[in-house]
Amino acid sequence: MKKMKQTKYIFVTGGVLSSLGKGISSSSIATLLKHSGYDVSIVKIDPYINVDPGTMSPLEHGEVFVTFDGAETDLDIGHYERFLNTNFSKQNNFTTGQIYLSVIENERQGKYLGKTIQIVPHIVDEIKHRIKNAGKNSDFLVVELGGTVGDIEGMPYLEAMRQMKHELGSDCVISIHVTLIPLIRAIGELKTKPTQHSVQELRRIGISPQIVLARCEKPLSKELKKKLALSCDVDDDSVIVAEDAESIYKCPINFLKEGILTPIARRFKIDELKPKMDEWDMLVKKIISPKNSITIGFVGKYLSLKESYKSLTEALTHAGANTDTRVNIKWIDSENLDNNTLYDLEDVDGILIPGGFGERGIEGKIQAIKYARENKIPFLGICLGMQLCIVEFARNILNIKDANSTEFDPETKNPLIYLIEDFIDQQGNEQIRTHQSPMGGTMRLGEYECKIKKDSQLAKAYNNNLTIKERHRHRYEANPKYRSSLEENGMIVNGESSNGLIEAVEIKNHPFFVGVQFHPEFTSRLQSPNPIILEFVKKSLESKEK
Ligand code: GLN
């Protein structure tokens, strides 16, 4: 591992429009630096006023990603972990809400000694403090600023970035601007004007980017690149074209081919960067043209917004890359699933029920679970998916017809799933009550240890490692009152937390039927796929081959 004396900062801003893939671009740059032998960290700044995305609707925000230390973060943190194969923490994502909250708290405690509190210097100082904190101990810190240059709420962050360059010098802080070069189809021409305007806007604030990363649908000619370099005032080798890629994991390789590391090394005045990308390249090839293929029935409810299942669909891709398999997803809307539409599940090789909140689509998911159980189709239920497979088993095997979760029927006489608070009230153990959600109630968040039962399907998946750590995000819990009747009838508790919470179940005499209370998708990476998701993909492949 090489070591830099002073952290080098790379700020990534966006121009022209949003959704240009700044998260993937930032992750790809960080990946190349990491594979060059450096210690790399990365931070996402969200300029909105919410303190975190935990209470935002998935329709508004996409997935809420959970870090090991229990922070509810932007989904880009998930990309960072998947690309960099690293656990990041609550320090790697902050919002305007958090910045103001700490400045106002400091003000209330009298920490500013009676001064007038202003955006400059107080808010900007807090931003710089958080950025430096995220970068301490790293050789490089990539800082991704959410939103688009010109947004009012982004201004204090751009000012912080300008000041950091002033303070640390131009060989410690560089700026990369990600923009779009639109193709005007009627005349078949690529247009550079929006990029020029966006760079001008940045300059007005006092920032001149050193590298322009241009998203385009087709290659940019040498002349256009030269024209862009001239008008944006960057070196000729510093216009990097990012064409649409077949897989997001191909981006680091594409950026490398485009030569992005040359201007980065030159600007930072460091030796040539030579990343080792062989293993990565091999995995990407397996994503793009694998030998095998399977289809997984994905029974969920936010299907119009697949972004809310980002980590899980990526985890399936990782499991596929590591088994040389294309994992096709058949999206099945649980609201449309009932006894008459189960034929939707006939052509799938495995059935997956993801996590979720709220009553909509619950009965459809229960039907899908019954179908998987009875037809011996490999099944994985995650969080809500596990809770529902217990409810299904209770209704159809234990014959408890009104079995339910109190999330959906607070009055049920048979709460197979109940609030974590109810568990605490019955069993004691106050330690569980660590996280108070802002809406009230206990949300169990972040990483916890799980003890796995020997010789179970879960143990096999985790390579007989009987103590594992996985991440959580839930308010409800399986009720231990029913445990013995579940076990007597063939549903085994195969995972437990140290304080006795039921963390996983499986059923006997089934090729693969596992429910887990944790979210295995949050720890899956391209280079180290999550074990239980990998096992589910392998079993689905086996079942297809049979
Ligand atoms: N709604 C369920 C709970 O709160 C499941 C949550 C989830 O799937 N993430 O426990």
Image (cartoon, grey):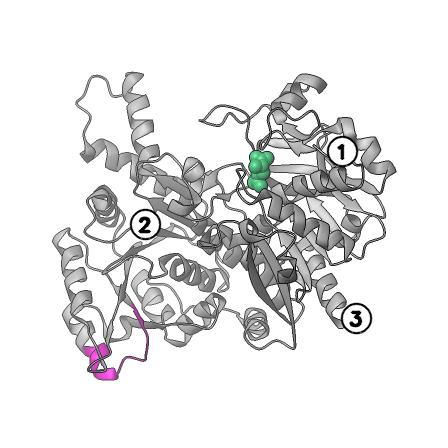
Residue 431 at what x, y percent from top left?
A: 63, 22
- Dividing the picture into quadrants, the one containing residue 499 is top right
Q: Which mark is residue 146?
A: 2
Q: Mark 3 = which residue?
A: 546
Mark 2 touches mark 3? (CB < 8 Å)? no
- Alpha-carbon distance for marks 2 and 3? 48 Å
- Alpha-carbon distance for marks 2 and 1? 50 Å
Q: Earlier in the sequence, mark 2 or mark 3?
A: 2
- Dividing the picture into quadrants, the one containing residue 313 is bottom right
Can you name the residue that lies furthest to the right here? 488
- The 10 Å Cα crowd at callout 3, few under 14, some 14 to 19, many 20 or more, is few
Query: Which contiguous range is marked in magenta?
Result: 214-226
- SS at mark 3 in the image: loop
Q: Nearer the viewer, mark 2 or mark 3?
A: 3
**Of residues 57 and 248, the one drawn nearer to the viewer in this rendering:** 57
Residue 447 at what x, y percent from top left?
A: 60, 38
Left-right relation of 364 to 216: right
